[in-house]
Amino acid sequence: MSVTAMRLAEESVAANHQRASAFVPQGEVVIDCNIDKIFYGDFLAVNSSSVPIEKKKITGFIGPSGCGKSTVLRSLNRMNDLISSFRLEGQVNYHGKDIYAKQVDPVIVRRYIGMVFQQPNPFSMSIYDNVAFGLRLNRFKGDVDERVQQALERAALWNEVKDKLKNSGLSLSGGQQQRLCIARAIATEPDVLLMDEPCSALDPIATRQVEELMLQLKERYTVAMVTHNMQQAMRVADTTCFFGVDLSKGGRTGYLVEMGETRQVFEDPVAELTKQYVSGEFS
Ligand SMILES: Nc1ncnc2c1ncn2[C@@H]1O[C@H](COP(=O)(O)OP(=O)(O)OP(=O)(O)O)[C@@H](O)[C@H]1O
């Protein structure tokens, strides 16, 4: 990070928090995420970040490396529970229910709030079995063939794989593998899809295909996505959250600087730090 960026990051973090919290959701909030603090052991990774995820919209998380985008995203379905040093102070409410409440089973949370990772990660099994995997895990009683086809259609992959469903998922191209992972995630009919840099391992053509797919998916699902690619956020996100890194106390703590309608964040940002970031002055 450059000296200018550091200076800007050190400008009033409190004022930025106020700006961030000025965002008023326009639609129904599916996940109301109010993070007070996130720690990994003693390390304060994320501070004061409230991120409402709105129904059937794509919410994009952008910001420099290490600002906590993935940490916040993974907090939305308790994926960070798998890291023993992780600790969250605050609340993440899904349709008004605290997903971190003691009695809540994280496996059930992830059934409704699914995840697609950066690297396409199909299982070493057939295309069909990859998509059917979650259905079997959840003891789905309906027509598995029908559900597999539907998920592959919704993931815009059916026409490319319908004649080779028994082939290994690993035999597909990178872009097809990522769409297969999306099909696997939506087969169980989640409500929300979390996507952590879903295109970063893909070439430009496969990236455009996945972006077009995301725009179709938001008609049915609520999506939150981390991206390093600002053009991608502009192309697909309805709402954009810009996270920064607070270096003022000698640490590197991520926090939400600004959240707003994507066009506003890119064309008329409120915070100086956002302005510098979206104009490419630091990355
Ligand atoms: N498992 C972990 N254990 C300890 N610290 C972690 C862990 N995961 C992330 N961190 C730290 O938390 C901070 C936020 O990381 P995170 O990956 O969420 O940021 P990010 O904005 O997604 O970064 P990038 O854009 O580089 O992927 C970083 O300082 C990182 O080193």
Image (cartoon, helix red, strand yellow):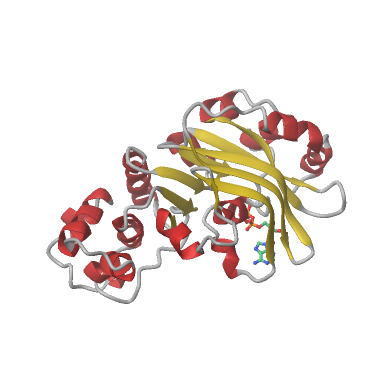
Q: Position of residue 177 (x, y in %)?
A: 33, 62
Residue at horizontal 32%, vertical 47%?
209
Q: Nearer the viewer, residue 152 or 209?
A: 152
Q: Work out which residue is located at the far top of the displayed protein and give it.
A: 268
Q: Work out which residue is located at the far bottom of the displayed protein and give it.
A: 124
Q: Position of residue 243 (x, y in %)?
A: 66, 43
Report the side of 45 relative to 118 (left or right): right
Residue 145, by quadrant, is: bottom left
Q: Position of residue 251 (x, y in %)?
A: 82, 55
| Residue 280 appears in the rendering | yes
Q: Position of residue 279 (x, y in %)?
A: 63, 33
Q: Quadrant of ligand 1?
A: bottom right
Residue at horizontal 59%, vertical 38%?
241
Q: Quadrant of the C terminus?
A: top right
Q: Work out which residue is located at the far right of the displayed protein and give it.
A: 249
Residue 151, by quadrant, is: bottom left
